[in-house]
Amino acid sequence: MSRHAVQRRTAASARPAALLLAGLLAAVLLAAGARVNPQRAGAPAAPPARVIELNIGDEIDPIMAEYIDGGIEQAAREHASLVLITMDTPGGLETSMQEIIQHILSSAVPVAVYVWPTGSRGASAGFYILLSADIAAMAPGTHAGAASPVLEVGGYPVTVDPTMQKKVMNDATAFLRSYSEKRGRNANLAETAVTDAKAFTEVEALNGKLIDLIANSKEDLLAKLDGRTVTRFDGSMTKLELHDPEMVAVGMSARERFLARIVQPDAFFILLIAGVLGLYAEFTHPGMVLPGVIGGISMVLALFAMHVLPVNFAGLLLIVAALALFILEAKYTSHGVLAAGGVVAMLIGALMLIRSPLTGAGVSLGVALGVTVPFALLTILLMRLVLRSRAWKQTTGREQLTGAAGEVTEAISTPAGEGVFEGMVRMHGELWRAVAPEAIPAGARVRVVRITGLTVQVKPEHESAAARR
């Protein structure tokens, strides 16, 4: 066999092995490519993480609780990956706080509460909410705590006996302990925010194991939470997949914004005064309709706000006293003393009307002045119009004849009883039977004293003129 024949036979036998090696290499490369890019290999793309963002940026009240509860339920319906609640609050009502915490603890979606931005606080009721979250976080330059319960009557703190105070304090600490321990947080340190009104910076809260982390921004927080496993309140473990998340900011609905505006102290005071003034105008001037409608609606809205706000009964009494003083000013001459007293009473009542020791919120001085002075002027003006209208002469019906002048057409000389004479007079083009205590000749001018049935009692006009002089 020649050398060339051997080479051809060797090449022919090596060709299938080379093809097999090339096929194996291509399969390996394709498998590796499929692992690197599953979408290119035909696998469906994973949906982006959805984060529902809520905000507690004011006092915690029933409207705020309704908003937060609705946002958590929306996150569950949309199968969101996380509920992010940003917070900057001075505190609020205990009942509303407990309602929010109950929804956080039972939420199907992990909840992160983030005290943000810099300079914000999670005080009082906000501290309880912060510690109830699956993830508690704070931004640099923020603080939380000062969660001691404050007993109020009419919006002002009151002193109670030691036994009652101890009872309230123990209830508050037990409530905080009931979920903070299960969240793996330092319950003993958290209790000092209740018993000693202690507050914590973000560093102190992190070192004391009250919060889980410090984040510079919302984006930084989500980046730090991506891939983190959290223990839910029911003990289950959930891994947060937050790579390139879709942030959905959920604000208050139009209804919630409207109700939240009503329960602001300034708005409540304006509605209260508008309601009083509108109803007062309708009662003193029946038939105007519009003031009564506006006053009725305003009063109902004010009553709704009164159900939510800590209203001071003494402030309400001062406002009622001011209204009485304005009415008296219209009826009696006091050279402005009664009106000035009413203005002072209403100003003090407005400033005392609402006062929360947690936030210092109340009716502002500017609104109190801007409402009190016009209210005083309108009340006095309306009452004076009422009093003046009572002195007006009746212009319709038989009563208009009282004081009217007439002419005797048939001498009033026929005796009609002891000391009474009768005749006929013409008034307003009509003939009337007339009686008088003295005889009056025909052609004389007379004035009507009063009317009895179809008979008018008259007297000579010169006597009426003399009496007027």
Image (cartoon, grey):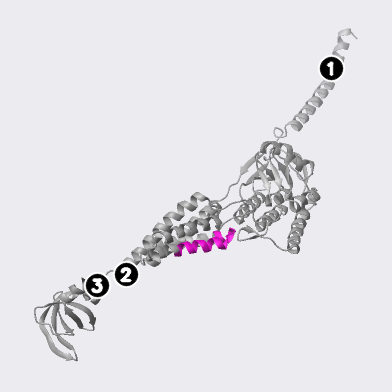
| Residue 129, horizontal then vertical, whole percent | 70, 50
In this figure, which residue is indicated by the disc labeled 3? 396
Dot 1 or dot 2, earlier in sequence:
1
Dot 3 or dot 2, earlier in sequence:
2
Calculate the distance from the C-alpha at mark 3 to the C-alpha at mark 1: 132 Å
Q: Is residue 7 above or below residue 63?
A: above
Foreground pick, 447 / 217: 447
Mark 1: secondary structure: helix
- State the extent of the magenta-drawn residues as a range: 305-324
| Residue 223, horizontal then vertical, whole percent | 71, 36
Main secondary-structure element of the magenta-colored stretch: helix
Q: Is residue 4 above or below residue 293?
A: above
Labels 1, 2: front one: 2
User: Is residue 318 one of those drawn in magenta?
Assistant: yes
Q: Marks 3 and 1: CB-CB under 8 Å?
A: no
In this figure, which residue is indicated by the disc labeled 1? 12
Dot 3 or dot 1, earlier in sequence:
1
Q: Residue furthest top?
A: 3
Q: Amino acid at mark 2?
A: Arg
Mark 2: secondary structure: helix
Calculate the distance from the C-alpha at mark 1 to the C-alpha at mark 2: 130 Å
Labels 3, 2: front one: 2
Q: Marks 3 and 2: CB-CB under 8 Å?
A: no
Residue 335's quadrant in the figure? bottom left
In this figure, which residue is indicated by the disc labeled 2? 390
Residue 41 relative to residue 347: left or right:
right
Q: Quadrant of the N terminus?
A: top right
Name which residue lies at 52% across and 64% down.
317
Calculate the distance from the C-alpha at mark 3 to the C-alpha at mark 2: 15 Å
Numbered label attached to residue 283 = none
